[in-house]
Every structure is written in structure tokens, then in C-alpha cells.
Image (tube, rainbow, N blue to C red):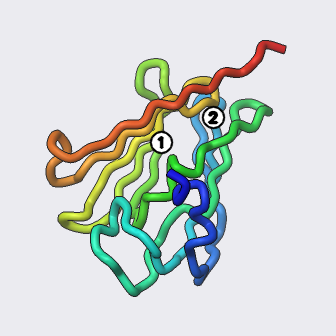
Amino acid sequence: MIALLLVPAFFTQVKYPNVKSLTLDGLTVRYSIVKDVPRYLGWGCDEPIKKPLERFGSVKVTYGKETFPLATSAYSDLFWMHEVRIRKAKEYVVVWMNGGDADSGYECEWFFKKGQLLKRRVSSSEFPENFWEETNYVNIRPNN
């Protein structure tokens, strides 16, 4: 778990592209993609690789005028993204992405409600029912 919190220190940064933005129902997710040589394995990177792979450099979430924190662990292990989209699903706004290649391919979904990340689900593209992980986030905010 400590490695996830220290992720930025484990990369050699190669390139900083422009910031991209997705908006739906008042939720805005701004993110940058950087190209780094991974120092550890993650989704989209299942064996040691010496070439740079794309990953999220930063992610900022706003809902209305309020900014919400996003845990680094929600995106630090996602490499080689191909697509990032946003959609509505019942009471959630879902940010969906896919990445990797063949056996390292994955799909990831972030489930937001009123700006707060409530759940992350990552699954294998080839065997989504056999290889997946899910994280639930608790965000208790005082009423002011």
C-alpha cells in the first residue's frame, strides 16, 4: 500500500501532453497523460518493460464549483490507456477507460456520485468474470 502512495517518485518522466477534460451532469474530470518507464507492474503492464508506457499524470475532479480529492491509488496502476469516456448509469456518473494489449488488456470504471468517487472496478478485457478487482471508497464529509 505504501508504494501506491509514493507512486510519482517511482517514475522517470518522459513527456507531458495536454490536459484533457470530460464533463457530464455537473461532474468534470480533468486528467493528463504522461509517458513513463514503469518501475512496477499494474493493469496494462504485466511483465517488466523497458519502454515508456502511458499513464495518468494527474487527475482533478470537480462537481459544480467544489473540488474533490481523488486517491492516487485510483489511477496509479493503470498503464497504456487507449480510451477514456464518461457516461450516466443510474444515479452514478461513470468514467470508463480501457487499455493494455491482449493478455494485459483491461477495462476500468470509476463510479462518482455528487463529485465523490465511490467505487473503482478493474477487470481483464479477455476474462472479465475471472480476473477483476473492486475498491470501495468512503468519503465522510462534515455538513457545513
Please say whether residue 20 is visible from this viewpoint.
Answer: no
Helix or strand or loop: what does disc 2 sit on?
A: strand
Which residue is under mark 1?
95
Please say if 37 is above or below 105: below
Residue 1, labelled with which disc? none
Amino acid of disc 2: Leu
Q: Residue 109: x percent and y percent? A: 40, 41
Q: What residue type is labelled 1?
A: Val
Q: Which residue lies furthest to the front in this view?
A: 2
**Above or below for 100 versus 139:** below
What residue appears at the point 66 percent right and 21 percent down from the top-left corner? 140
SS label for mark 1: strand
Q: In this view, does 46 lie to the left or right of 69?
A: left
State which quadrant residue 132 falls in.
top left
Location of residue 139 in the rendering, given as x and y in whole percent from the top left corner: 62, 26
Q: Which is more toward the observer, 58 or 10?
A: 10
Residue nearer the viewer, 99 or 27: 99
Residue in view at x 45 percent, y 53 percent = 84
Residue at numbered disc 2: 27
Alpha carbon distance from label 1 to label 2: 10 Å
Q: How crowded is mark 1: few (under 14 residues within 10 Å), some or many (20 or more)?
A: many
Residue ID at (62%, 45%) = 29
Judging depth in this view, the residue of 12 and 61 nearest the camera is 12
